[in-house]
Amino acid sequence: MVRHFLDIHRLSAEDLRGILDDAHARKAARKGWPRGRVDADAPATDHVLAMIFEKNSTRTRFSFDAAIRQLGGASIIANAGDMQLGRGEPVEDTARVLSRMVDAVMIRANSHDDVERFARVATVPVINGLTDRSHPCQILADLQTIEEQRGPIAGKILAWVGDGNNVCHSFMHAAPKFGFRFNVACPADYHPDLRDLARGGDHVALTSDPREAVAGADVVITDTWVSMGDSDYEDRLAAFEAYTVDEALMATAAADAVFLHCLPAHRGEEVTDAVIDGPQSLVWDEAENRIHAQKAVLAWCLAGD
């Protein structure tokens, strides 16, 4: 059976826990190793990962490339604009062709529907590297980072401050699967999609007050207020003015609270320098853990062959 990794809510809690545990184990096993050395089990030996990018990327591109290499495989990277896909070839036809040429496909896409269409006809695993709707790989890296520093995620309180965007959606999907509470603070005009909010059930609470969301939280998370493709920059800056994560807001969280941001950050907007560069910030560990979390995702997908 082909294993796709499209959204966290599609996987069982058991599978997700297994992927996260594997991410922890793979990182620990490599301690002190050169980054180019292949993992001992090399689960991607003789496998090729295709990566398709419709959006600019730093962390997703480098981390997936490093991940497949450390698993013993190889990669082919293409921008959608350089492919016939960028000239109007149907998504389904591209999926059928690539399924004959590679062993898995990662897509960073503008439209979540396009990734769903691709996966419906692909005969190899398809991984969502980010869409307008969700960003599941990022959440696994974030949960790995939290557990490394603060222990098991179950029972923790996570607070989201800012735009109810794709990353926020994936956190809401993860909350009931991993057993944490997720408080979301955002302006009314920028709330999460109600379908994704519903997937979080009783594990998710929505408010417009950042202090209410952050009070007593173990983890405080934010993201850029203006994502690629957003054209309402000035309107967003005005709407989110009261949602900056600064030292005063962090002081209302738990005494040992940590700060996460998936990057890139707009310093002085959604977060201050004092927070992102401060002792509570785990953003650099978080960025590195994209490699380890995605290795675990790739290994899980390829094990379904």
Image (cartoon, helix red, strand yellow):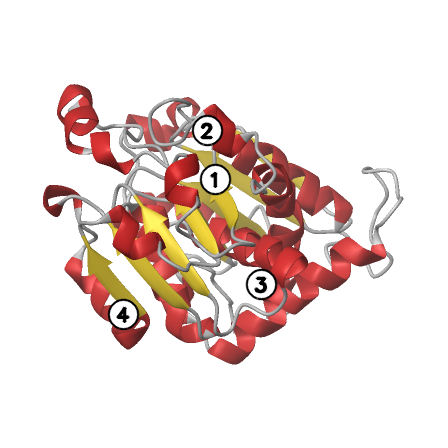
Q: Tag on residue 262?
A: 1
From where the camera sits, is residue 92 visible?
no
Circle 4 sits on which residue? 199
Q: Label 3 crowding class (10 Å Cα cut-off): few <14, some 14-19, many 20+? A: many
Task: Name which residue type carries label 1.
Answer: Cys
Circle 3 sits on which residue? 301
Q: Label 2 crowding class (10 Å Cα cut-off): few <14, some 14-19, many 20+? A: few
- In this rendering, the label closer to the viewer, 3 or 1: 1
Q: Position of residue 216 (x, y in %)?
A: 41, 60
Q: Nearer the viewer, residue 286 or 3?
A: 286
Q: Is tag 4's residue or tag 3's residue first in the polypeptide sequence?
A: 4
- On screen, residue 231 versus residue 31, left or right, reads left
In the depicted structure, whether residue 153 falls above or below residue 52: below
Task: Name which residue type carries label 2.
Answer: Pro
Q: Are marks 2 and 1 in contact (CB under 8 Å)?
A: no
Q: Are marks 3 and 2 in contact (CB under 8 Å)?
A: no
Mark 4–mark 3 distance (CA, rounded to whole Å): 23 Å
Q: Are marks 4 and 3 in contact (CB under 8 Å)?
A: no
In the depicted structure, whether residue 157 falls above or below residue 91: below
Q: Is tag 1's residue or tag 4's residue first in the polypeptide sequence?
A: 4
Task: Name which residue type carries label 3.
Answer: Cys
Q: Secondary structure at mark 2?
A: loop
